[in-house]
Amino acid sequence: MNKVPTIDVGAATAVSEADMANALRVLAMDAVQKANSGHPGMPLGMADVATVLFNRFINIDPAEPAWADRDRFVLSAGHGSMLQYALHHLVGYADMPLSELMRFRQFGSKTAGHPEYGHALGIETTTGPLGQGLATAVGMAIAERMLESRFGTRLVDHFTYVIAGDGCLQEGISHEAVDLAGHLGLGHLIVLWDDNSISIDGPTELSTSMNQPMRFRAAGWDVHQVDGYEHGAVAAAIDRARASSRPSLIACKTTIGKGAPNLQGSEKTHGAPLGDAEIAAAKTAMGWPSAAFEVPEVVRMAWQRVAERGAKARAAWEKGLAESPAREAFLQHLSAHLPATMGQALKEFRKEHFAKATKVATRKASEMALTVINGITELTIGGSADLTHSNLTITRGMASLRPGDFSGRYIHYGIREHGMAAAMNGIALHGGFIPYGGTFLVFSDYARGAMRLSALMGQRVIYVLTHDSIGLGEDGPTHQPIEHLAMLRATPNLAVFRPADIIETAECWELALAATDRPSALVLSRQNQPMLRETTPDANLSAAGAYVLREGRGPRDLTILATGSEVEIAMAAATRLEAEHGLAAAVVSMPCWELFEAQPRSVRTAVLGTAPRLAIEAAARLGWDRWIGDGGAFIGMGSFGASAPAAELYLHFGITVDAAVAAGLQLVDRGGIDR
């Protein structure tokens, strides 16, 4: 590290980048110590790199944290959150006064344990699960290139900077993201690697021998290796990276806990306070005032110049925007507001296929609805994890993104479900687009980490999950989802749609597109489904989450609940129960539990009724007892599936009309739930 002089608070000229870096160290050490919780090692180790990046390069304006052409900064190594909070405090974000640093990791503070999008100004994405920030940043860089291809560099010309650690690069998601970024040639993506050779267990040589620079070069990245404490070398590397047409890795050789004289270089600094004695020794070595959280005014003034530079850059950009003939189109695109004609177009689509009684798999119905959607708006960006023609996520006229050409609207993510999900988060966070991407429902397991963050951040990301049950047939139990619906439904703020037919599929697409504060999962069948709606689909009945698709004649004797492909079975069973046994059986389609749960109790009661309830779903029972009650019955899966044609599997596992009729009769005979 550069030698740090004792600071003369009366001499502004004495302030160096080393002084600025030490301000970050001090605030991080003191905040972690006061909280008695946190990770001081990374902020101390990367303080100099962060200082060079912010002091010389990054364009942000704390007064307008969301201006469109700002640089994006992603702290992928989110455990080092105090580095970001200290940066935000020193450059002047309004919600990050010193009092917030003093409340680090306390309930209600802006300084959460890991950076959280929407919780504090200037946090571009939630990080903490290692590798997620890096992979999300790839999506941000994709979005930047796509917007630039549409509106030019006068309006769109910014960089995405990432600070990542060894853990980020070891996580599997990083391999997916790094490969995709290198393939596409994302030249405005710059990753600063905290190359300190330490993880929680100790030296990284305990678990890896990976040559990371060679790995990145093999993936098509530019790679620079520097001493993380040689400011000139770090700056030169960033300069070269900014000029490259390829993504860049800057391997910054650092020491974890740098500046803590007795603990630096040890894993002990990773996730625990340094202790009062070590902090005092560190401040003495820096020539720093001993009082907690103290930063000399001249150092604060130096950091304020970062904000001043950013304000000038924003003002120049806003002038260019005001003079641009593309101003209105750009702002409309950035807002990601759907055309007002979308609802009517999808209504007409529903009415057309109601009249035709169109029978198709719901994955095909999704493709047909997307043809309407993608024809009306340029905002939607499709993609698939190498299952395009199985998920049916591409529509006529959609060109694919290619290296050097970002004018298209379709992304071939490759066999990278996790990377796809994280990239879609980044695209949504960046702004200007509505991403959707497809894979098989069973492979949502691979995407789970990023899907959870979609929900946590409240991003409009749409997951198209096809081949949703044993109905996919011969591919067998490895590909047949059983527990996946329960897992997705257990995720807060995720709307899970399992439509029964073409009408519900179009309705669910409309609802997913309209949900700006949460992700959606469209769970779709491989096998054909008949059109089941019995009345003209003027209103979007799926918006209530569940509705009476068919009411029995007279007071209900039984209510049959179902989703997706099993609604057809429920309808057939209700018909037989009435015709052969004189029972009034209502059928309730439940395309989205989350929306139904949000309805007033009176609405839910009117839909569910008081008669005994039978639920049918070719998936695990978990969660269904909420709707059927203690006296209800369930027909579904209690084991993994098998390899056979779909019809044979439904028969083998007892998910049939005969089974539903028998279960319904038994429920009515024993009284079911209280009526």
Image (cartoon, rainbow, N blue to C red):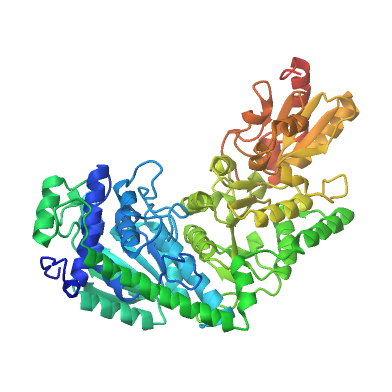
- Does residue 228 show up? no
User: What is the tally of numbered marks visible in this picture?
Assistant: 0
Residue closest to the eye, 48 or 165: 48
Residue 18, image quadrant:
bottom left
The picture places residue 319, in percent across and down from the top left corner, at 52, 81
| Residue in view at x 59 percent, y 65 percent | 383
| Residue in view at x 54 percent, y 43 percent | 492
Depicted 27 relative to depicted 7: above or below: above
Task: Name the side, left or right, on which 380 lies relative to 608.
Answer: left
The quadrant the C terminus occupies is top right
The picture places residue 273, in percent across and down from the top left corner, at 21, 46
The picture places residue 374, in percent across and down from the top left corner, at 70, 67
The picture places residue 489, in percent across and down from the top left corner, at 58, 41
- Does residue 376 show up? yes
Depicted 636 relative to depicted 282: above or below: above
Residue 639, image quadrant:
top right
The quadrant the N terminus occupies is bottom left
